[in-house]
Image: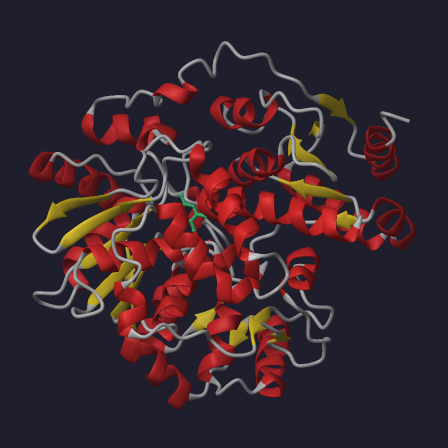
């Protein structure tokens, strides 16, 4: 499988190249040159397989010959062995035709573990083949840092340094990062804000000499390998609800548009998904776009569902590229214009085509709490403030008589304050995290200073020399 950039000016790469590169050099995002197709018979053959087996078969065409099928299979088994549910992504019926696909039984209790756990193993395989070492650096305000650390802890040929703002993350979030006992993990608490941390990471990447010396890498959300790792659970859920003979809809609480794009990719591969419902909080750029072709940037306002507090959804570029007929020049021009003006000019014809399949939905914080309470009262289903938006959206916008797969993206115990506010109980942490508050923490405190941070990363890289 070969990959092309949405902006058409970067070299084609194979899967291993895309995995290590992340973003394309022309600023675009990598996409497969064509979508692999599964016939109805191919899909039926996946029914009833254990999740890691199903995942290996769905992901195999994307990986091509970058790793062997046996290696991919082993990676999938290892990636999902630590999940708290044997089903990996259990499907729970919440109402007539409304199903929660629980994607939060991994180590950090959020759906990002599904892709990142696998990506950690794939990095290790590809680096071993190439005889390379990488140093991943990243900044976090809380959640992505812990998922990235869990993904590469103890993986060979990878070091990871995550910067977080000292004293400005929640205790659960901090402990999830700093209590991972792995020799290749360096947590740095910076005396500054999250934006300072992000600027420091950007500055490290911009320092060409340092970047080359350290072979810096990122596991950011625009890596196509992460999209690939999110396709199997839609296949798994749809097969369980009667596909390929029966159509389904999906409803996804959306931030950077990666999760729902994976569902759309599943449709290109042959899965009969008739509708895509995009859930948003008060940061509703996608809902405004789908309602009225208004993709205009506004400031980010904090909400009860922080992982959806976005200004711009980076993976939307991939959908745009497809609906512009894969015209890379037009995609590049649209994205550049968007960056300059803060408003995306999407041709009316493309907008109408997108809105035939995609519907937007928005909930305020008040209504989010009301819906948590309502699903708890009516279905005894306790949903976190992200997932509940997609549950309400699926109930209100699902086609009559068609099952709706709702992406459950976080465990309710990750957001105990909001849950307590809504229903008066604090959900306990699941068993595998119940000792989180007793675990030993390890982090290094550092000033908001590029030289100081680069020295830490370099010394860490040379720790065994
Ligand atoms: C990351 C995240 C989202 C948003 O997913 P995207 O792929 O960025 O759209 C939603 N909910 C939770 C809990 C998340 O962690």
Vertical relation: 48 (above or below) 423: below
Q: Nearer the viewer, residue 190 or 147?
A: 147
| Residue 285 pos. (x, y %) | 42, 64
Q: Nearer the viewer, residue 58 or 89?
A: 58
Q: Quadrant of residue 187?
A: top right
Counting from the top left corner in percent of width and height, residue 200 is at 76, 43
The quadrant of the picture occupied by the N terminus is bottom right
Q: Could you tell me if residue 271 is visible in this image?
A: no
Q: Residue at x 60, y 34 (%)?
A: 149
From this view, report whether residue 26 is shown above or below residue 138: below
User: Which colour style is shown?
Assistant: secondary structure
* Left or right position of 419 against 83: left
> How far across and down, in percent of the image, does residue 153 sit?
62, 32
Q: Residue furthest front?
A: 70
User: Which residue in the rendered view is the most extreme toward the bottom?
Assistant: 349
Q: Residue furthest top?
A: 438
């Amino acid at each position: 499988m070969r990959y092309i950039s949405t902006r058409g000016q970067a070299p084609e790469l194979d899967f291993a190249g895309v995995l290590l590169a992340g973003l394309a050099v022309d600023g675009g995002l990598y996409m497969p040159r064509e979508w692999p197709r599964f016939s109805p018979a191919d899909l039926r053959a996946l029914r009833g397989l254990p999740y890691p087996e199903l995942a290996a078969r769905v992901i195999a065409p994307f990986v091509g010959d970058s790793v062997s099928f046996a290696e991919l299979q082993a990676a999938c088994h290892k990636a999902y062995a630590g999940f708290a549910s044997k089903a990996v992504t259990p499907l729970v019926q919440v109402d007539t035709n409304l199903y929660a696909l629980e994607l939060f039984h991994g180590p950090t209790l959020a759906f990002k573990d599904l892709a990142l756990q696998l990506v950690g193993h794939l990095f290790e395989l590809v680096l071993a083949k190439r005889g390379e070492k990488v140093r991943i650096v990243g900044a976090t305000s809380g959640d992505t840092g812990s998922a990235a650390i869990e993904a590469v802890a103890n993986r060979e040929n990878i070091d990871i340094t995550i910067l977080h703002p000292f004293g400005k993350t929640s205790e659960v979030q901090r402990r999830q990062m700093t209590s991972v006992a792995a020799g290749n993990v360096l947590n740095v608490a910076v005396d500054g804000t999250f934006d300072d941390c992000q600027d420091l990471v950007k500055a490290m990447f911009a320092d060409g000499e340092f970047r080359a010396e350290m072979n810096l890498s990122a596991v950011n959300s625009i890596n196509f390998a992460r999209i690939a790792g999110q396709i199997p659970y839609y296949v798994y859920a749809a097969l369980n609800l009667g596909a390929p003979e029966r159509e389904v809809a999906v409803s996804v609480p959306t931030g950077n548009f990666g999760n729902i794009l994976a569902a759309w990719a599943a449709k290109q591969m042959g899965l009969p998904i008739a509708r895509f419902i995009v859930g948003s909080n008060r940061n509703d750029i996608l809902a405004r776009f789908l309602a009225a072709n208004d993709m205009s940037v506004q400031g980010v306002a904090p909400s009860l569902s922080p992982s959806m507090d976005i200004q711009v959804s980076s993976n939307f570029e991939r959908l745009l590229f497809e609906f512009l007929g894969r015209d890379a020049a037009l995609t590049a021009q649209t994205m550049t214009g968007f960056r300059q003006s803060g408003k995306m000019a999407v041709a009316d014809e493309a907008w109408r085509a997108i809105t035939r399949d995609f519907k937007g939905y928005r909930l305020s914080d008040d209504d989010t709490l009301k819906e948590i309470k309502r699903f708890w009262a009516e279905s005894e289903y306790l949903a976190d403030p992200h997932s509940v938006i997609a549950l309400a959206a699926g109930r209100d916008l699902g086609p009559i008589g068609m099952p709706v797969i709702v992406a459950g993206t976080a465990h309710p115990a990750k957001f105990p304050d909001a849950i307590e506010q809504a229903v008066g109980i604090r959900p306990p942490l699941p068993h595998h995290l119940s000792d989180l508050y007793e675990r030993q923490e390890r982090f290094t405190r550092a000033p908001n200073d590029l030289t100081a941070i680069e020295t830490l990363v370099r010394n860490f890289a040379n720790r065994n020399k």
